[in-house]
Image (cartoon, grey):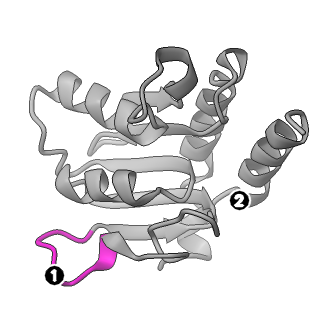
């Protein structure tokens, strides 16, 4: 995993992902947000959790953002792109990250209960797969953690 000095360059895109995460709150969805940056750093896709809103078990922020980016680019291969997400992806989203061929995955907080980028599993760096994106972890992790903890505190 990459951290430290390179993490700082991802703070602005992570703030965009955090703003996207807040958009999940009105529907009662867990506030997780994601943005996909194109090769020049422009946002080509964004998303937040829509599972509750749409009754869709695959309505995770990462998948929503990857779908939007693929539509914007006119192809499913997102080579040259970076996925920025507020929480460590689950197995489904880590798999989609690999399959979409993004160059880099940047995430905020680790997910000790369901994370698949080092916490429980490490899907994105599995040498048996044909693509392994660079990983930058822990970018604005405190902000991401606080957003999720506040959400769940309100549901107890």
Q: Residue at x 46, y 29 (%)?
A: 47
Dot 1 or dot 2: first in sequence order is 1
- Indicate the position of residue 97 as horizontal and vertical percent values: 30, 54
Residue ID at (57%, 76%): 3
Question: Callout 2 environment at 10 Å: few (<14), some (14 to 19), or many (20+)?
Answer: some
- Pick the residue in front: 25 or 35: 25
Can residue 15 be seen here? The reply is yes
- The residue depicted at 70 percent of the width and 23 percent of the height is 28
Q: Position of residue 100 (x, y in %)?
A: 20, 49
Question: Is residue 131 highlighted in magenta?
Answer: yes
Magenta span: 124-132
Predominant secondary structure in magenta? loop
- Residue at 64 percent across and 21 percent down: it is 23
Give the number of the disc on residue 128.
1
Q: Is residue 102 above or below residue 22?
A: below
Position of 132 compared to 115: left or right? left
Callout 1 crowding tier (Cα within 10 Å): few <14, some 14–19, many ≥20:
few
Q: Quadrant for the C terminus, please.
A: top right
Q: Which residue is disc 2 drawn over? A: 141
x and y, in percent, of residue 116 in the image? 45, 67
Question: Residue 43: in sight, yes or no?
Answer: no
Is residue 68 toward the left or the right of residue 60 in the image?
A: left
- Which labelled disc corresponds to residue 59? none
Q: Is residue 67 magenta?
A: no
| SS category of the residue bearing label 1 | loop
Using the image, determine if residue 101 lies above or below residue 55: below
| For the residues bearing labels 1 and 2, Cβ distance under 8 angstroms | no
Foreground residue, 150 or 137?
Answer: 150
| Real-space CA distance between mark 1 and mark 2, rounded to the nearest whole angstrom | 29 Å
């Amino acid at each position: 995993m990459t951290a430290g000095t390179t993490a700082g360059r991802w703070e602005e895109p992570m703030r965009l992902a955090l703003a996207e995460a807040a958009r999940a709150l009105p529907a009662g969805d867990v506030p997780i947000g994601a943005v996909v940056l194109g090769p020049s750093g422009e946002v080509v896709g964004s998303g937040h959790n829509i599972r509750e809103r749409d009754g869709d078990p695959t309505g995770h922020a990462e998948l929503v953002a990857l779908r939007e980016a693929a539509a914007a680019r006119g192809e499913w291969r997102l080579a040259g792109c970076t996925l920025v997400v507020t929480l460590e992806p689950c197995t489904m989203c880590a798999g989609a990250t690999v399959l979409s061929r993004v160059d880099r995955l940047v995430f905020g907080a680790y997910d000790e209960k369901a994370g698949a980028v080092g916490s429980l599993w490490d899907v994105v760096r599995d040498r048996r797969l044909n693509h392994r994106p660079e990983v930058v972890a822990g970018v604005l992790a405190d902000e991401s953690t606080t957003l999720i903890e506040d959400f769940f505190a309100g549901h107890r």
